Image (cartoon, rainbow, N blue to C red):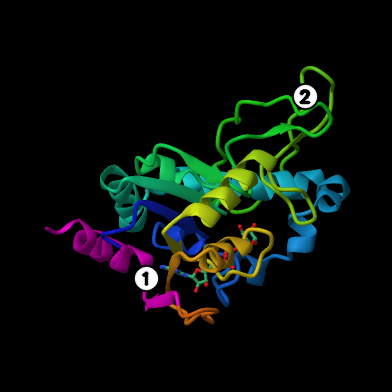
């Protein structure tokens, strides 16, 4: 770690779990154990029932606005201030990395804070956040002032292409880095899940931080078992210690 010149930090929902944002696939607590992604995270679902989908994403955005970055987000921002080069790639649609002070974040799955028109792609300033005390609720999406199209959440839905520039930059960084930290991801959603594999194949060291034991594909991979909010500050301390 101390000799690494180019770090990549690749994060998933687990890095925000300790801030109070549920992950997707953790049993019982994960969003996908309470909601069917087919009903909520596809273009077809939005066209079928825009009020259900828009309401659900506004509920999630309101929850994100209510929570704060945790020590894992802060440790990553700290690391970026001290290592020669760090590329931060996230699958998360929250802005907790940015709020923790991370200067540039590659969002592979979009953002809850960047809604746009479904028809002309015009960006819309996010409306007033929902009052989450009412729980999930049906909410009609706004209409585009330019073309009258429906405003959709700025996230990447299943079956949709990832933002090309962010994906290209992420793959380039993974292929060039010396060390990749994979934090809080189950590694089952592609093409994002290719990133740690590409780094290992390109000769980088890969360190997984996750309470669950993940299958390691090569001898250049390590697993630190535990919560990111506990392990990452310790790891950063060790790296930056004289
Ligand atoms: N610290 C570190 N890891 C954690 C923590 C924690 N405190 N809590 C849970 N985890 C781990 C879980 O063990 C799991 O491996 O985080 C991972 C979360 O996995 P998923 O819920 O599958 O989330 P993610 O990998 O980010 O999902 C990828 O799937 O649903 C789509 O678009 C969505 O970006 C998302 C993508």
Q: In the rendered view, does 167 fall on the left or right side of 120? A: left
Find the distance from the CA under tag 2 to the CA under tag 1: 42 Å
Quarter for ligand 1?
bottom right
**Mark 2 Cβ inside 8 Å of ligand 1:** no
From the top left corner, tell me how far across and down residue 242 is, in percent: 11, 58
Residue 239 falls inside the magenta stretch: yes
Q: Is mark 1 within 8 Å of ligand 1?
A: yes
Q: Residue furthest left?
A: 242
- Asked if one can make out residue 78 in the rendered structure from this viewpoint, the answer is yes
**Which residue is found at the position 30% from the left and 56% from the top?**
71
Please name the residue shown 49% across and 58% down the image: 11
Q: Nearer the viewer, mark 2 or mark 1?
A: 1
Q: Which residue in the rendered view is the most extreme toward the front? A: 203
- Give 166 or 116, whichever is nearer the viewer: 166
Depicted 51 relative to depicted 194: above or below = above
Closer to the chain start, of discs 2 and 1, is 2
| Residue at which label 2 appears | 144
- Between residues 234 and 197, which one lies in front from this camera angle? 197
27 or 109, which lies in front?
Answer: 109
Q: Give, as a single range, the part of the protein colored magenta.
A: 220-242
In the depicted structure, whether residue 207 falls above or below residue 83: below
Q: Is residue 1 above or below residue 93?
A: below
What is the secondary structure assignment of the residue under circle 1? Answer: loop
Residue at the disc numbered 1: 227
Q: From the viewer's perspective, is residue 166 above or below residue 44?
A: above
Q: Position of residue 162 (x, y in %)?
A: 70, 47
């Amino acid at each position: 770690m101390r000799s690494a010149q180019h770090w990549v930090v690749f994060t998933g929902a687990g890095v925000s779990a300790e801030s109070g944002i549920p992950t997707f696939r953790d049993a019982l607590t994960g969003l996908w154990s309470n909601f069917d992604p087919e009903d909520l995270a596809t273009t077809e679902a939005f066209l079928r029932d825009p009020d259900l989908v828009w309401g659900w994403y506004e509920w999630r955005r309101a929850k994100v606005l209510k929570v704060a970055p945790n020590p894992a987000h802060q440790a990553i921002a700290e690391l970026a201030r001290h290592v020669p080069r760090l590329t931060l790639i996230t699958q998360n649609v929250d802005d907790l990395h940015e709020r923790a002070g991370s200067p540039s974040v590659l969002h592979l799955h979009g953002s809850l804070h960047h809604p746009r028109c479904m028809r002309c792609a015009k960006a819309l300033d996010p409306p007033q956040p929902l009052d989450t005390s009412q729980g999930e609720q049906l909410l009609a999406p706004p209409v585009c002032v330019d073309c009258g199209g429906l405003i959709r959440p700025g996230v990447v839905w299943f079956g949709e292409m990832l933002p090309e520039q962010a994906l290209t930059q992420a793959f380039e960084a993974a292929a060039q880095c010396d060390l990749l930290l994979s934090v809080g991801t189950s590694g089952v959603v592609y093409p994002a899940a290719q990133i740690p594999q590409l780094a290992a194949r390109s000769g980088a060291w890969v360190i997984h931080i996750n309470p669950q034991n993940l299958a390691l594909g090569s001898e250049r991979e390590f697993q630190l078992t535990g919560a990111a909010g506990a392990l990452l500050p310790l790891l950063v301390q060790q790296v930056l210690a004289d």
